[in-house]
Image: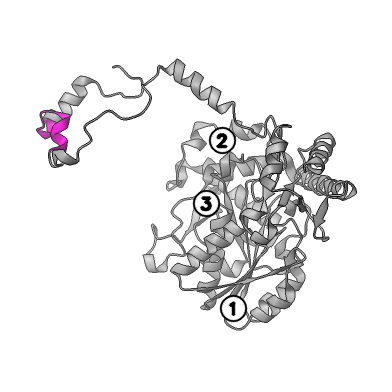
Amino acid sequence: MKHRYLPATDQDKKDMLDAIGALSVDDLFSDIPEKVRFNREYNIKKAKSETELTRELAKLAAKNADTTTYASFLGAGVYDHYAPVIVDHVISRSEFYTAYTPYQPEISQGELQAIFEFQTMICELTGMDISNSSMYDGGTSFAEAAMLAAGHTKKKKIVVSETVHPESRDVLTTYANGQYLEVVVIPEKNGVTDLEALEEAVCDETAAVLVQYPNFYGQIEPLKAIEKIAHKGKGLFVVSSNPLALGILTPPGHFGADIVVGDAQPFGIPAAFGGPHCGYFAVTKKLMRKVPGRLVGQTTDENGKRGFVLTLQAREQHIRRDKATSNICSNQALNALAASVAMTALGKEGVKEIAWQNIQKANYAKQKAISLGLEVLYDGPIFNEFVIKLNVSVKKANQRLLEKEIIGGFDLGKVDAKLENHMLVAVTELRTKDEIDLFLQELGEIK
């Protein structure tokens, strides 16, 4: 056998060809005309030995600017947070990382309990009654919430704030097109949802009002005021929320939210170039049977022993397609486990402490930026992000920052032309005072 990762020997190949009555591999392509076949060598490098290949890939990887060696101020939905070392240890156990859907509860109790604990902790953070066993990511959770609202209310109008993450709004638009739903975007005013415009847009035909808390610009939305407007037309109130922020902010459930969604990435899940991550989806009890995906429940067996089972599976693989709540065909169980381990390791006080540090450090950075003469947009309360207006392009600023081993903020000009030269800055608990000071000093000196 010449190659370590190609286990078929020459004899294996001969036996397979004999079994199907072919003389050679070329016979398998006999139906393809000679003139359209690829009859030359590929224009790629020659194969290297394993040692040579490993060395080359290591050199390429070393060129990356990553959060283990650079101070990162990049957020916009994916954040650099502390992850307890126990997270990788637990999710690396083969009984977890090779597990799929626990169809046989009698041999999947560990997996089912882990999912049950995830659901429980999400409910505690969001202030909701029910949480499903995770979604693909925050964006699909957001869109699924709108689909649930439209199906539940039998209405076709979805009202969404402009302060919601633009990628989540894009996913929502894609879903809505397939369901022939109208999506109405409410503009922002001073970094939060324009309440007057929202009041005017919401009517009896509105299926749901969707906002983000904290929103895309880092501002804290006035959920109490928005809830009154959202429910005036008997539509649903949907809130997308950073779960870490809920360690210290009042949960959306306490403001009367019907559905709370988001991404569990802040809890023990690495940025990983944007995924895979783990969406969460929590609802009030009345919407339990409309939830996409599945629910894990707790029960007792005939001997009175505590056990866990899949209590609700409303996807099309399990029931008639026309009765399915969505086409979510799997879930991010391993990432949900990572989030569960992180939350468990931190505990309630740990989550609260990290959330508080995010508020303290972000507000320190915001005030420091102002004192250095940098222009900060919006004056409302923030969690861990805020917007700075620069005199140069964000691309140029970030290139200069990289030279100082700093990963700069998100270029808002990429998603909104009127925010050209505006940077969305994220400051998490991992950033030190020295890093914050250096970042802002360098930012202020870039001309």
Query: Is 278 in the magenta?
Result: no
For the question of whether residue 221 can be seen, the reply is yes
Which portion, as a residue range, is magenta?
19-30
Image spot of residue 235 (x, y percent): 61, 76
Per the model, the C-alpha gap separating discs 1 and 3 is 26 Å
Residue at figure coordinates x 12%, y 38% from the top left? 30
First in sequence, mark 1 or 3: give its number: 3
Task: Find disc 2 in the rendering and name its residue.
Answer: 91
Q: Secondary structure at mark 1?
A: strand
- Tag 1: amino acid: Thr
Count of number-bearing discs: 3
Q: Is residue 344 visible?
A: no
Mark 3 sits on what residue? 136
Nearer-the-camera pick, 128 or 412: 412
> Residue flagged by tag 2: what amino acid is it?
Ile
Q: Residue at x 64, y 50 (%)?
A: 77
Image position, residue 435 (x, y; %)? 80, 35
Which residue lies under the disc numbered 1? 206
